[in-house]
Image (cartoon, rainbow, N blue to C red):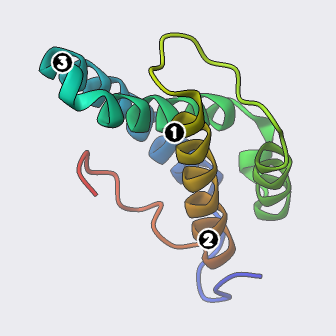
């Protein structure tokens, strides 16, 4: 399922999720200040925040297979409830995109060491 050379590190995954959560909140605030032209950026950041919030406190981060199953469960949902977004369809598309990105990262066990704000 993953790179056998590198062991799954649940603590590193939680750190990555926390940092992406904080960065998404900052991105939302910046997009909000930019106004109407940045509504797409706001929805994209809101989607990343929703995904990180749904995953960061989950007990499944300790095991790679359980974390992948949790991501798959979230991706199978038909609706992602959120308030304050501009376009529901765009938000749902971005949530699914972030979940696909995380699923790939989880399967390859790569990318969680990149904790800088801009990726």
Which residue is rendered at x = 86% and y = 47% of the image? 73
Which residue is rendered at x = 57% and y = 30% of the image? 50
When the figure is inspected, residue 67 is found, relative to residue 105, above or below; the finding is above
Q: Does residue 17 show up? A: yes
Among numbered discs 3 and 2, the one appearing first in the sequence: 3
- Where is the N terminus found, in terms of image quarters? bottom right
| Image quadrant assignment for residue 101 | bottom right
Q: Secondary structure at mark 1?
A: helix
Between tags 3 and 2, which lies in front?
3
When the figure is inspected, residue 114 is found, relative to residue 36, above or below; the finding is below
Q: Nearer the viewer, residue 31 or 57?
A: 31
Which residue is rendered at x = 79% and y = 57% of the image? 63
Mark 1 Cα shell of 10 Å, populated few (<14), some (14-19), many (≥20) = some
Q: Secondary structure at mark 3?
A: loop
Q: Are marks 1 and 3 in contact (CB under 8 Å)?
A: no
Mark 3 Cα shell of 10 Å, populated few (<14), some (14-19), many (≥20) = few
Q: Which residue is mark 3?
A: 35
Which residue is rendered at x = 50% and y = 27% of the image? 87
When the figure is inspected, residue 34 is found, relative to residue 115, above or below; the finding is above
- Judge left or right: residue 67 versus residue 26: right
| Residue 94 position in % (x across, y down) | 52, 45
Calculate the distance from the C-alpha at mark 1 to the C-alpha at mark 2: 21 Å
Q: Tell me the tag on residue 104.
A: 2
When the figure is inspected, residue 18 is found, relative to residue 114, above or below; the finding is above
Q: Which residue is mark 1?
A: 90
- Where is the C terminus found, in terms of image quarters? bottom left
């Amino acid at each position: 399922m993953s790179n056998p050379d590198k062991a799954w590190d649940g603590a590193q995954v939680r750190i990555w999720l926390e940092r992406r959560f904080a960065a998404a909140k900052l991105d939302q605030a910046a997009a909000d200040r930019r106004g109407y032209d940045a509504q797409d950026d706001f929805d994209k950041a809101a989607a990343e925040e929703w995904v990180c919030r749904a995953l960061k406190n989950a007990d499944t981060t300790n095991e790679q297979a359980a974390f992948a199953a949790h991501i798959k469960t979230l991706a199978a949902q038909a609706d992602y409830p959120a308030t304050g977004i501009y376009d529901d369809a765009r938000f749902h598309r971005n949530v699914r995109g972030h979940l696909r990105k995380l699923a790939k990262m989880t399967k390859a066990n790569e990318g969680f060491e990149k904790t800088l704000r801009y990726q």
